Image (tube, grey):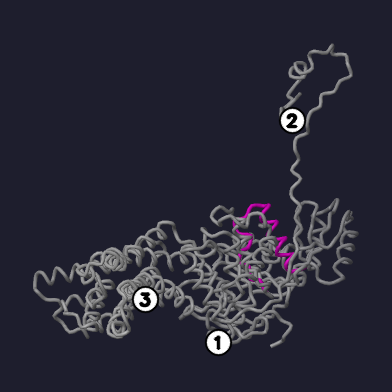
Amino acid sequence: MLHPESPVTGQTRMDSAWGSQTGDEDVHAKVTQASVDAGQIFEQEYKPWNGTLNPRWMRNWAILRHHLLGIVFKGHRPWGVVTRIVLLLIFLGSLSSAAMVLLSGVVGDSTLASMWGINRENMYGHVLGFFPRNIIFYPIIAAILVGGMISEDRSNGTSALYFSRPISRVDYTSMKFLSIAIILFFVIDGTLAVYYFAEVLVMGRGWSWILDTFPMFLLAAFSGLLLAITYTSIGLALSSLSKGRFFPGIGLLAVIMGTKTLAAIIEALFDKTILYVISPFDCIAHIAQSLMSIESTYQHPWTWSLASIVCINIGALYILTARVSTLEVTRE
Amino acid sequence: MVESLLIETRNLTKSYGPHVALDDLNLNIPHGATGLLGPNGAGKSTFLKTMLGLIQVTSGEGSILGYDIRTEGEEIRSKIGYMPEYDALNPKMDAIYQVQYSGELLGMNPNIALSRAHQALEYVGLGEQRYRTVETFSTGMKQATKLACALVHDPELIIADEPSNGLDAKAREFMLQTLENTVRQGQKSVLMASHLMEDVERVCENIVLLHKGKLAAQGKIEDLKAIDKEVEIHVWGHATKMEEGLLDKGMKVRREGRVMRVRYQDDSTYHTILSTAAKCETQIRKMHDHEASLEDLFLVIMERLGYDVKGSEALLGDLS
């Protein structure tokens, strides 16, 4: 029997197929017809929708959800696998202080507890300790997060998706900013809260201890918030300048590390700390040291660092808003 | 402002420093499908941005769907579905979620937006492909996804910027049919910017032609075609004599062999043609009104504006 798709190409093949007969019979070769592309049944029907559109806050919530839930769920902003893994690793790494508190509690060693337990230096260190948190953890996660946040809208043209809808540029920028700041805040201050409350639970701290240490916790959390805001504003400003992910990421690392390195060289050469005012990290560290009454490692007044960090944020936000205002709806 | 008009502008002017992008535009665009035409730099993009309420006009006023373009941009963009010319989709997202998100950006509840996204993608022919990422789509499928994004909230007006750009014949046909259906079946208005005359003629009843920021022509295509109405005759014998006879009587004649086109002036044109033929002993084997194409119409308009153009490609491309 012929295979349905076997081509019948000529007499020779027919003879071969029917050769057991005499050739005089009234026989017919059954050849399957070539399949006909009948298409698919498709009836185009316009379906109206008479619903009501929600107000501005719902639209802004949609942008925020899109970016935040995308880290965990499908159907929202597709964050890369590497980003998710790095975020998870850094989050777990940031929980190391809480883990040490748990270990102290389990072992029951008071030396360990005093070394890793809650005090102003350790809380400062959780947020603004240089190694590994502010040389590896927080700058890297900030760089990975901000990379494509605005630049991808420019390169993919998805800015048109926002601005052809009732989304203002202020709302767009604010929600993008909040998305990154919330993730950073969660990693920095969320783990700080876990660290603090792990001590309360594991060491069985009472209300008096909480009342005594909670203001310090709040000041450390405020410093963490300042760090998250500053890294976000610098990172988003760089993202708004670019069409790719690499430049904003590496740019942010260069700004954070480069300014600190330069200031450190000047300090080593001239024994002057004033140049640390150009380093965002050092400005926040200096402010935090003053707020938390920790011995300062800088010679200049902390208000200079405060003024500097305000200027850095204003400058970054100015670049960000100026660049966002150039995002086009029609062709660029 | 007249409520029944889709778009109305009065002395609308938009300047960027010394450059006048829109120059004293007075438009009256009715509901239905309208083609927006013009060469590069004519002001089409500025016009669209102005209509979306994204840029402030320098002077004049305008309304779209009854909303003031100067003060009610947010309301306007809620009522409009905009389909951009270039890629405006996240390549890593599934089409369904892309359309859902565009609905959420309008203020739709996420579940309703998802439900509408299914309907919109089904409508644009991507029902089976809706869970594929946009990066795996062909150009036609991407265009269809953009249209679905524009249709997700059932807008009163769809602004489609070059909807058939880069599409093959089949995809182009489907896109045009979809836009036609949206107008006829969905009772929606479409403002379609395109450089393809055939596409505009197929979908739209009205056109607006911009040139150097000024309004070159507007109105119903049928009405505009009347300015270039000709009578086509197929003759046999003494064609040259016939042509000369018509020219002597002040008629405007274009001839190619035995086929002549005589500019229609009034109903006496037919009598003039027949009497001239009788006088020249020329047989007229066929005579009918010649329906000008949109392309012909633009050549006439540009000729009147003082430009010597060979066709729409020159008209919409290099002319400046």
Identify residue for label 1.
B59
Q: Which one is closest to the eye, mark 1 or mark 3?
A: 3
Q: Which residue is mark 3?
A: A319
Q: CA distance from mark 1 to mark 3?
A: 30 Å
Q: What chain does badge 1 belong to?
A: B
Q: Could you say whether the residue bearing mark 1 is in a helix, strand or loop?
A: strand
Dot 3: element: helix
Kindly tell me whether residue A254 is visible in this rendering: no
Where is residue A81? Give x, y as percent.
Answer: 43, 56
Q: Is residue A322 left or right of residue A258?
A: right
Q: Nearer the viewer, residue A259 or B96?
A: B96
How many C-alpha atoms fall within 10 Å of the one at disc 3: few (<14), some, or many (≥20)? Answer: some
The amino acid beneath tag 3 is: Ile
User: Which mark lies nearer to you, 2 or 3?
Assistant: 2
Asked if labels 2 and 1 touch by Cβ distance under 8 angstroms, the answer is: no
> Which chain's residue wears label 2?
A
Q: Is residue A173 above or below residue B130?
A: below
Q: Residue A45 at what x, y percent from top left?
A: 75, 63
For disc 2, the neighbor class at 10 Å (few under 14, some 14 to 19, many from 20) is few
Per the model, the C-alpha gap separating discs 1 and 2 is 73 Å
> In the rendered structure, are the residues bearing label 1 and label 3 in contact, judged by CB atoms less than 8 Å apart?
no
Q: Disc 2 marks which amino acid?
A: Pro
Task: Give the magenta-colored segment's residue range.
Answer: B157-184
Q: Which residue is mark 2?
A: A4
Mark closer to the chain start, 2 or 3 = 2
Q: Is residue B43 magenta?
A: no
* Residue B209 sits in quarter: bottom right
Left or right of A188: which side holds B16?
Answer: right
